[in-house]
Amino acid sequence: MAPQSRWHYLLETHQPRDALDPQDVGPKHKGELPMYYGWAFTQADLMKYAEHHHLEAPLMSRLSAKLGKSSVNYAELSESEAKDEDVRAYLKGVAAIAVKQDLENETGIALKVVRPLSEQYVAVVAMYNHIEANERRRWIDVGHGLADAVKTIHQSIREAGVGSRPLWWYDWKVLDWDHYC
């Protein structure tokens, strides 16, 4: 299979899902590739969220020296910072981490960023994968309230004008690309 057709095959056969069968969840699952339950973001969604919530991004040393400060706020970029290609590229690159950290602060639970198998989305902020789902759901429910955590994440995302809902996503990095040749 040619690389382009292999890519389309994977996109067609590994779509995100609303729900998983109970036998596909837990440590004794039937061998599926890891899927992550979370909210997908386009690059524009990440930037919109970061700007709306006034997220602060620490700068790497080169940019810090260039701008004369140690961090920047997505919503408070100066005109020159907004036009600076290095600054824009850096902020795009760390946006998923900034969003994840903000949602962790809002909910009090550890989240993970994964790269979904998708042409449109660049990041999924996930609560758990299907292997650890039962254990993580119990832990989140006891410590924080699962429904409350989901509601808080939904609310933060909606406030930013991002239209994402939680789905089960394949992680791009764990797909065995050679298997599908």
Image: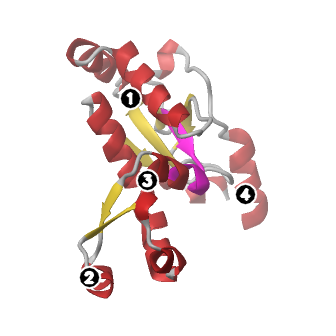
Instruction: Classify the position of the C terminus by image quarter.
Output: bottom right
Mark 1, residues whose alpha carbon is within 10 Å: few (<14), some, or many (≥20)? many
Q: Which residue is mark 2?
A: 68
Residue for point 56% across, 46% down: 41
Q: Is residue 50 visible?
A: yes
Separation (CA) of disc 4 from disc 2: 47 Å
Q: Which residue is disc 1 drawn over?
A: 131
Magenta range is 38-46
Mark 3 → mark 2, Cα distance in angstroms: 24 Å
Per the image, label 3 sits on a secondary structure element best described as helix
Q: Give the mark, 1 or 3, whose residue is nearer the N terminus.
A: 3
Residue ID for mark 3: 96
Name the residue located 39 percent from the left edge and 51 percent from the top edge: 54
Q: Is residue 96 left or right of residue 176?
A: left
Q: Nearer the viewer, mark 4 or mark 3?
A: 3
Q: Earlier in the sequence, mark 4 or mark 3?
A: 4
Element at badge 4? helix
> Can residue 111 be seen at all in this image of the molecule?
no
Q: Quadrant of residue 53?
A: top left
Q: Are marks 4 and 2 in contact (CB under 8 Å)?
A: no
Q: Which residue is mark 4?
A: 6
Amino acid residing under circle 4: Arg
Closest to the observer: 138 or 130? 138
When the figure is inspected, residue 35 is found, relative to residue 95, above or below; the finding is: above
Q: Residues within 10 Å of mark 3 (few under 14, many from 20)?
A: many
Residue 169 shown left or right of residue 61 in the figure: right
**Quarter-of-image position of residue 153:** top left
Q: Which mark is residue 150?
A: none
Assess disc 2: are there few (<14), some (14-19) or many (≥20) residues with their C-alpha within 10 Å of its C-alpha. few
Q: Amino acid at mark 3?
A: Ala
Percent position (x, y) of residue 105? Answer: 27, 37
- Find the distance from the CA under tag 1 to the CA under tag 3: 23 Å
